[in-house]
Amino acid sequence: MSDSPLLEICIDSVASAIAAEQGGAARVELCQNLFEGGTTPSFGTVYQALEQVGIKVNAIIRPRGGDFLYSDDEFAIMQRDIVALKELGINGVVIGMLNADGTVDMERTRQLIELARPLEVTFHRAFDVTADPFRSLDELIQLDVDRLLTSGQEPSVLEGVELIAELVRRAGDDIIIMPGAGITPKNLTRIIRETGAREYHVTGSSSVDSKMEFRNDRCFMGKALYPPEFSMKVADAGKISHYVQMLND
């Protein structure tokens, strides 16, 4: 087995799953609504992704955008989604729940982990808005979480690189620390050098123009920001291959 760091691609479509595999990624985190940081993908999307690719598919379990303080109904939705997606054959789940005081919701996180096993469990960037990163790290290790996705409690990994390096040091072999947010080919080598992490989380996407011939440019389906209706972000196999090559150098 190669000692090279592992690459995970954050995606929101089957096309991106295929591109991630073509580019040499080891795993994808499948979401929808990436603009909101990712929410639970549809069962149809997960099913089709599993049909089309052979790499590992992890699914985020997040019922909505916004904060990570969930109601009883939202928690019930997360439980039901884990059961259903587990039956489809996913590799793992990506979760994150907090208390109002910015601590990890230990009890309900434990329940989700027990429900998900033997699947892999990643704790997502809810960690980045916890009040005490080192306490949170210790709690995730107590919960036997497999992996922590983090930007080092900053907008991007490059800004949070010092904290990430310390998390890697403290975690040892107890939990995988996976930097993610704002990683590019320009900064990846520095991030590898300064963090010593063994897994990295990137998007590696490009804009793909719509095949629509008739276009009504006056009408938008989104709100406020008016996202482009005639192009979409899709993982780029060439970009992903470049990341993989960098990790293998």
Image (cartoon, grey):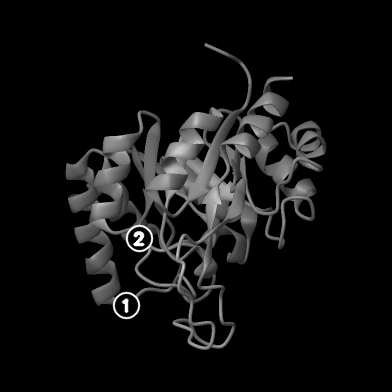
Q: Is residue 3 visible?
A: yes
Q: What residue is at 75 percent from the left and 40 percent from the top?
A: 185
Disc number placed over residue 40 in the picture, else none: 2
Q: How many C-alpha atoms fall within 10 Å of the one at disc 1: few (<14), some, or many (≥20)?
A: few
Which residue is label 1 attached to?
71
Q: Nearer the viewer, residue 90 or 14?
A: 14
Q: Between 64 and 140, which is closer to the camera in this rendering?
A: 64
Q: In which quarter of the image is the C terminus?
A: top right
Position of residue 42 relative to residue 119, above or below, is below
The type of residue carrying mark 2 is Thr
Number of numbered discs on residues = 2
Q: Is mark 2 on a helix, strand or loop?
A: loop
The residue drawn where x is 32% and y is 61% is: 108
Q: How far apart are marks 1 and 2 (CA)?
A: 16 Å
Say whether disc 1 or disc 2 marks the residue closer to the N-terminus: 2
Q: Is mark 1 on a helix, strand or loop?
A: loop
Query: Residue 209: x and y, percent?
Result: 55, 59
